Amino acid sequence: MTPQDVANAKRDRMSKKRVAFPYGETWINNKAMAEQTSSPYKFTAKEQDPETGYYSFKHRYYDPRLGQWISPDPALHEYLPYMNKTAKEDLHGGGVFNPVHLALYSYAVNNPLIFIDPDGLKIYNVVIEGGGPNVFGHNLTLHVDDKTGKVTYYEVTGLDTKNVYVYVRSKEQFQKHYSDRLGKLFKDKNFDATKSGDGYEVVEAKGVNEEKVLTHLKKLAEKHGEGKEKYKYHYKNNNCAKFSYDAYKQGDKEYTPEPGNMGENPTRYPTDLNQAIEYHNSLPDTKEK
């Protein structure tokens, strides 16, 4: 064996390379060393089952060879007209009036180079206006499980700035607790937590890693839940907006303000955080189904 053969063999052992087709099917997968196993986390950082080759997106499995899900979209109920929601603008993403929602097995609107498909868990940023004894706007993080429809709000609040805790509330608990701020929304049994309304502004936080965000929030709730260790709140440097901003950052998404927007501070002001999220949602690399 020549010195060049030795060098080539060493290079082959040490190189690591993976090339995949747009829909996730692996084309080339070189390992760094012969005895090393391949990472199961490949396409969109999801775990691939070594036997079936399917990727687990938590609520359903995806087949990269077909470029399709192996089960229908669990969010179908969101797209169907019901009760007083019959128009396109009333339904999630335009509902069944948007043809892409009728393709229940397609991945990322059949355009994986531009769009991504999340885990079936959506994260939203919510701003409610001041009301009652509190004149200031308030920021919360909203989680919606597309499969079950369960709605959960995460927030930091308290009777005063020295007694602040992390609260986790259901939709009904949220409506009741903030009845003085929500106007007629707090009485609405059909209140859609993902739609803006009177005193209630909501924006989807696209591009975040939902599982990482939820893991972070649940840890904070476990540590700083009511009656436990107090949350170190500061009206300017560690307030309700910063609480949500940090959660999204834990989910690999930092919502910086739009360039040129002088004075906008999403880590301090709830409305500014919503504006920053809307700006990032408009960027091509954060669009999703």
Image (spheres, rainbow, N blue to C red):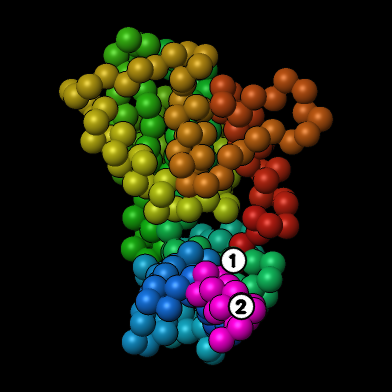
Q: Which of the 4 quarters of the picture holds residue 221?
A: top left
List x then y, in percent, for residue 83: 47, 63
Q: Is residue 20 visible?
A: no
Q: Is residue 243 magenta?
A: no
Instruction: Say whether residue 59 is left or right of residue 112.
Output: left
The C terminus lies in quadrant: bottom right
Q: Is residue 224 visible?
A: yes
45 shown above or below 182: below
List x then y, in percent, for residue 57: 42, 69
Q: Mark 2 to mark 1: distance in Å?
A: 47 Å
Q: Secondary structure at mark 1?
A: loop
Q: Residue at x 61, y 83 (%)?
A: 2
21 shown above or below 179: below
Instruction: Say whether residue 218 is left or right of residue 102.
Output: left
Q: Is residue 12 magenta?
A: yes
Q: Residue at x 36, y 41 (%)?
A: 216
Q: Secondary structure at mark 2?
A: helix
Q: Residue at x 36, y 82 (%)?
A: 50
149 shown above or below 25: above
Q: Which of the 4 quarters of the picture holds residue 153?
A: top left
**Which of the two residues, 51 or 134, is positioned nearer the viewer here?**
51
**Which of the two residues, 103 or 131, is positioned nearer the viewer here?**
103
Q: Residues within 10 Å of mark 1 (few under 14, many from 20)?
A: many
**Which of the two residues, 98 or 66, is positioned nearer the viewer here?**
66
**Which of the two residues, 196 or 151, is positioned nearer the viewer here?**
151
Q: Which residues are magenta?
A: 1-22
Q: Residue furthest left?
A: 227
What residue is shown with label 2?
3
Disc 2 versus disc 1: nearer the observer: 2
Q: Amino acid at mark 2?
A: Pro
